[in-house]
Image (spheres, rainbow, N blue to C red):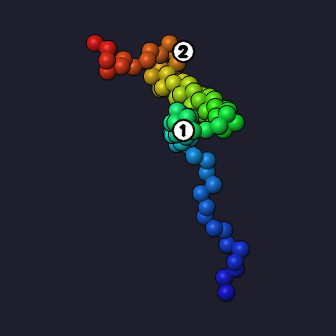
Amino acid sequence: MPKSSAKTTTNTAEPSPVAEFEQSLAELEALVAKMEGGEQNLDESLRAFERGIALYRQCQSALEQADARVKLLLDPEHPESAQPFASAEEP
């Protein structure tokens, strides 16, 4: 009879930074929409604002990390001198 102590495979790996960014951004957008609705009382609005600030900071940090990775990929020997990509709007 097989032992019941066999390991089960569970996904305990942390989500990727991109997935975390997308999740935080979606939650932030939902909070903003809810606050713009104007149906929250003051206490709910303050809690939502505090959560929104935390989400904004998480998103900003993720973007800064992504920017650093891109610079490193563009110029591995001198990432600080890497130039950003030109936007589609620039001639």
* Disc 2 target residue: 80
Disc 1 crowd, CA 10 A, few/some/many (<14, 14-19, 20+): some
Q: The residue under label 2 is which amino acid type?
A: Glu
Q: In the image, residue 59 lies at what x, y percent?
A: 57, 31
Disc 2 crowd, CA 10 A, few/some/many (<14, 14-19, 20+): few
Q: The residue under label 1 is which amino acid type?
A: Lys
Q: Which residue is pictured at 36% across the width and 19% down the height?
A: 87
Of 35 and 27, the residue lying toward us: 35
Judged left or right of residue 87, residue 2 is right
Residue 30 visible within the image? yes
Q: Quadrant of the N terminus?
A: bottom right
Q: Quadrant of the C terminus?
A: top left
Q: Quadrant of residue 57?
A: top right
Q: Specify the farthest residue to the bottom.
A: 1
Q: Which residue is pictured at 55% across the width and 34% down the height?
A: 38
Q: CA distance from mark 1 to mark 2?
A: 40 Å
Q: In the image, residue 29 lies at what x, y percent?
A: 51, 36
* Disc 1 target residue: 34
Q: Quadrant of residue 51?
A: top right
